[in-house]
Image (spheres, helix red, strand yellow):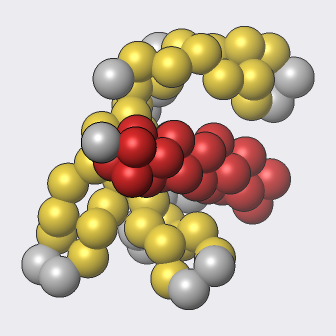
Amino acid sequence: MKYKIKLAGRAQLVEISSAYFKAWHVWNVKFEDGKAIMLFKLGTDWMQRNEDYLEEHLLRALGSFIDKIISARKRVVSIR
């Protein structure tokens, strides 16, 4: 799904999808410029693949945004 999020001082359109890699629940994020990264959560911290070089503040901002998506999904499931 595509989302508009404010990163590095400007609004960007990013495509966020979830998947499973081995036993990990991962989140794939594609940016407007075609760059793609894979994030996963370890405890309360968001991590990225070794191949991805996202700056720490951007990683935290994306992780926080994904946390909001997750909690919204949980609310919808619990209402049903």
Q: Position of residue 20 (x, y in %)?
A: 17, 64
Q: Based on the displayed image, in which of its 4 quarters is residue 59 positioned?
A: bottom right
- Residue under the point 40% across and 43% down: 79
Q: Is residue 15 above or below residue 74?
A: above
Give the number of marks: 0
Q: Position of residue 41 (x, y in %)?
A: 49, 72
- Residue under the point 12% across and 78% down: 22
Locate residue 44 relative to residue 76 in the image: left or right.
right
View extreme (right): residue? 9
Viewer-side residue, 57 vs 66: 66
Q: Is residue 45 above or below residue 33?
A: below
Locate residue 71 relative to residue 29 in the image: left or right.
right
Viewer-side residue, 53 vs 70: 70
Q: Position of residue 44 (x, y in %)?
A: 63, 79
View extreme (front): residue? 80
Locate residue 30 relative to residue 6 in the image: left or right.
left
Q: Based on the displayed image, in which of its 4 quarters is residue 26 positioned?
A: bottom left
Q: Is residue 12 above or below residue 71?
A: above
Q: Position of residue 35 (x, y in %)?
A: 41, 32
- Residue under the point 39% across and 52% down: 78
Locate residue 40 relative to residue 80 in the image: left or right.
right
What is the quadrant of the N terminus in the image? top left
- Residue under the point 81% across and 30% down: 8
Q: Is residue 55 in view from this perspective?
A: no
What is the quadrant of the C terminus in the image? top left
Q: Is residue 47 in view from this perspective?
A: yes
